[in-house]
Image (spheres, rainbow, N blue to C red):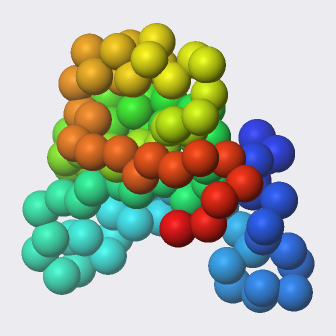
Amino acid sequence: MERGDYGWLTKDMGTLYQDFLPEDLKPSLEKYSISGTVLVQATPTYEETNYLVSLYENYEWIYGVVGWLDLSSPAFPEQLDLLMKQQGIVGFRAQQCGKSG
């Protein structure tokens, strides 16, 4: 939330209105003998995808990242090319900005 790209989260959402980082998840993974996880973007920004890739690079138990790209952006081809070269990218949630889905 500190990055400013979670405008859809509001204080009235209670427990959801906080950061959940890898350190918060690790105890549950250990408790239930889960070996790892895949991160899925929660906000439609290229920056979010890059942030999740940085987490993948720092935690061996993060197995991959499902990122996001704006299909209508002029930067789409370049961003897709850059992300496809990143280890850890396992898929995309792609949509045009302003469209739901």
Dividing the picture into quarters, in which one does residue 17 lie?
bottom right
Question: Which residue sits furthest right?
Answer: 11
Residue 77, relative to residue 71: is it above or below?
above
Would you say residue 83 is visible in this rendering? yes
Q: Position of residue 41 (x, y in %)?
A: 49, 53
Q: Position of residue 23 (x, y in %)?
A: 45, 56
Residue 52, relative to residue 8: is it above or below?
above
Residue drawn at (56%, 59%) of the image: 42
Residue 19, relative to residue 79: is it above or below?
below
Nearer the observer, 14 or 46 = 46
Residue drawn at (24%, 59%) of the image: 37
Nearer the observer, 74 or 26 = 74
Q: Position of residue 76 (x, y in %)?
A: 51, 24
Would you say residue 86 is visible in this rendering? no
Residue drawn at (12%, 62%) of the image: 35
Is 14 positioned to the left or the right of 30 in the image? Answer: right
Nearer the observer, 42 or 99 = 99
Dividing the picture into quarters, in which one does residue 30 lie?
bottom left
Is 73 positioned to the left or the right of 71 in the image? Answer: right
Q: Position of residue 54 (x, y in %)?
A: 43, 29
Dividing the picture into quarters, in which one does residue 4 lie?
top right
Nearer the observer, 39 or 101 = 101
**Tag count:** 0
